[in-house]
Image (tube, rainbow, N blue to C red):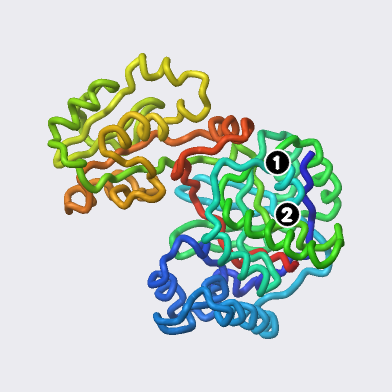
Amino acid sequence: MAIVKSFKCVRPDRELVEQVASLPYDVYDRKEAKEAVSGKPYAFLNIDRPETAFDENFDMYSREAYIKARDLYAEFKDKGIYKKDDVESYYLYEITMNGRSQIGIVGLASVDDYLNDIIKKHENTREEKEIDRINHVDTVNAQTGPIFLAYKKNDDLKKIISDNISAAPIYEFVSDDGIGHRVWKVDKAYNEQIRECFENIESLYIADGHHRAASAVKVALKRRQNENNPNAEYNYFLSVIFDERQLHILPYNRIVLDLNKKSLEEVMSLISENFDITESPVLEEIGDRGEFGMLVKDKFYILSAKKKVLDSVSGDVIKSLDVSILQDLVLEPIFGIKDPRTDERIKFAGGIRGVGYLKSEIDNDRGKVAFLMYPTSMEELFAVADENKLMPPKSTWFEPKLRSGIFIHEI
């Protein structure tokens, strides 16, 4: 039984939402964030990345940085850029990319559901990445970046969504990157129905935002040490929740920077022990599980896992993942990459960049070999999470990204 609450949302003025909405804080490095807010004083990224207001030598994790974020948020509210709704509501958030739309329900998920594994995870988090958002949320006293959750198909919620999107949206705009955004405020008559639908859903799944979720939970645990108020807003975290049928996972491709002191002939010979190798014209995407594109020099190959490989991993939700097959049979034994999270000889490219990006990296000698992956499926994600296991790093890439600053939950 999942708990998803309506809430009094703090949200931007209708005329300013396009200027406010920002990509998540963690898609930028420091230099990129500084450039992204240039000439955009109302962009929420100014609050999400407060170090952009200072010079490059400023400590972006200092107490002063988080106070700057808090003060800037207060200033935005004082200026009327943001206002808080008078009544608790759910919202619907539609994102459209390349003609494909997905609509999620905006509400508050439960910290206790996270702690009790009703909200399931498929990724490890790193404490050093959590600390920044813990300090940000705790100081600003608000959750500003929604967690991307998913649920298994539910026709009752599908009908509620359909009933509510016939009305005029409260927001409608196209962001600079060509992504369409529309938001509806759900009619209050549906609030109880939505709550009851989620109560009949066994599990929710974190699709993207593991670190944001973990940070929100740790802020709640910290505040619980000082008071015991089960109704406090910090016991819930801002989420956009999608039916699995709405979602599309893109591949997370790999680029290896050297051949591990081997010749290309040696590499190909070792790969051939577990894969059938076929030279091919460069493909934009891979056709099936168990297949990999391999781009090296001016050639492109399809690697197809042999039957003995597929038989050996059948029934194991982790080892049967394509990212695991590549890691276990190619990246570690051949290229010596034991931990892809820390090894500096590998880098990753989200599928939105496409094979053209991989080719550019190889052509310009910024990598020696690139692997084009078949995307992990929602079914695989659910299967791993249901067994309380963790996927290898960089297994999933969700696109388009949820915008920050459209919905804020004060805690």
The answer to whether the residue labelled 2 contacts the one labelled 1, judged by CB atoms less than 8 Å apart, is: no
Type of residue at label 2?
A: Gly
Residue 13 can be seen in this image: no
Residue 287 placed where, x, y %? 36, 28
Q: Residues within 10 Å of mark 1 (few under 14, many from 20)?
A: some
- Secondary structure beneath label 2: strand
Q: Marks 2 and 1: which is nearer the front?
A: 1
Instruction: Report the residue marked by disc 1.
Output: 117
Residue located at (69% from left, 69% from top): 142
In the image, residue 304 above or below residue 31:
above
Q: Residues within 10 Å of mark 2 (few under 14, many from 20)?
A: many
For the N terminus, the quadrant is: top right
Residue 32 placed where, x, y %? 39, 69
Quadrant of residue 278 within the rendered picture? top left
Instruction: Report the residue marked by disc 2.
Output: 107
N-terminal of the pair, mark 2 or mark 1, is 2
In the image, residue 27 above or below residue 120:
below
